[in-house]
Amino acid sequence: MVDRTITEGQRRSAKLIWDYHLMGHKPRNTDVAIGLGSHDLGVATTAAGLYHRGFFSTLVFSGGNSHTTRTRFPRGEAFHYREHAIELGVPDKAILVEPSAANTGQNITLSRTLLASLGIVPSSVLLVSKPYMERRSFATARKLWPEVEIVCASQPVELDLYFECIGDEKLVVDMLVGDLQRVIEYPKQGFTIAQDVPPNIHVAYEHLVRDGFTSRLIRN
């Protein structure tokens, strides 16, 4: 069996990147929330909890399928998120489903189109995502929906516990590294706004790439 654990040095670098990905926003009242589809059902759990705390009254779940979610969510990410949120007590009438998005940019643009078709033009949006996707989802929304105030939220969990939840330390670090590469590279392609990446984060990134955490990197 392949060892999927990581060294202490790799763990320290991963923790630096994990903390960088978190925007540190405090949840507050917004016009709508958008739960970004993924393999992680914790996004729907977190969105449901925020709904029950009264931060918004309309919740969009956005996401079709990818190669990483097709088996786990055969009917599509957004539909499975919706079902889970209803199980957690969110009223069906509060939930909108956007079932086609295949990437973060489409999560934003297709959700905006769906809301507009119903006469909803928000001035503030609470984006609910995986923890390590907060920064990239923020940068994407600010690029594609600049007139809207964006607040980010995710499951409040430490990296070590997230390792346990996913059950594969190497996979989690691969995803942290892949998202950081996109934070760095996507502004050059016009997909997101540029954000400052401190030198120690670059060092941690280069360390983990050298150590082979590269399965989620974009290949040129």
Image: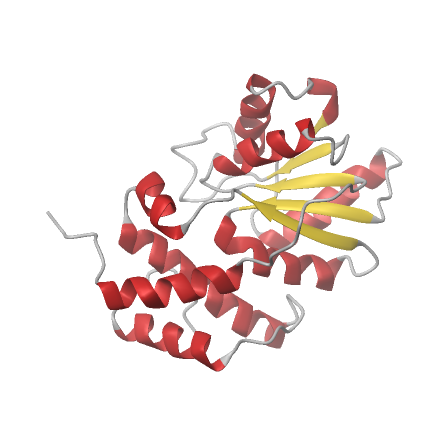
Please, which colouring scheme is shown?
secondary structure
**Whether residue 97 can be seen here:** no
Going 47% across and 82% down the picture, which residue do you hit? Answer: 199
Going 54% across and 68% down the picture, which residue do you hit? Answer: 183
Going 57% across and 20% down the picture, which residue do you hit? Answer: 88
Residue 65 vertical position relative to residue 209 in the rendered view, above or below: above
Whether residue 46 sits left or right of residue 146 in the image: it is left
Q: How many marks?
A: 0
Residue 95 vertical position relative to residue 34 in the rendered view, above or below: above
**Towards the viewer: 25 or 172:** 25
**Towards the viewer: 153 or 136:** 153
**Towards the viewer: 104 or 30:** 30
Residue 47 is situated, as x and y percent measured from the top left of the image, at 61, 35
**Whether residue 5 can be seen here:** yes
Whether residue 183 sits left or right of residue 177 in the image: it is right
Residue 109 is situated, as x and y percent measured from the top left of the image, at 72, 50
Going 51% across and 65% down the picture, which residue do you hit? Answer: 20
- Residue farthest to the right, as pictured: 119
Say which quadrant the C terminus sits in.
bottom left
Residue 6 is situated, as x and y percent measured from the top left of the image, at 23, 59
Residue 197 vertical position relative to residue 132 in the rendered view, above or below: below
Among the 4 quarters of the image, the one containing residue 214: bottom left
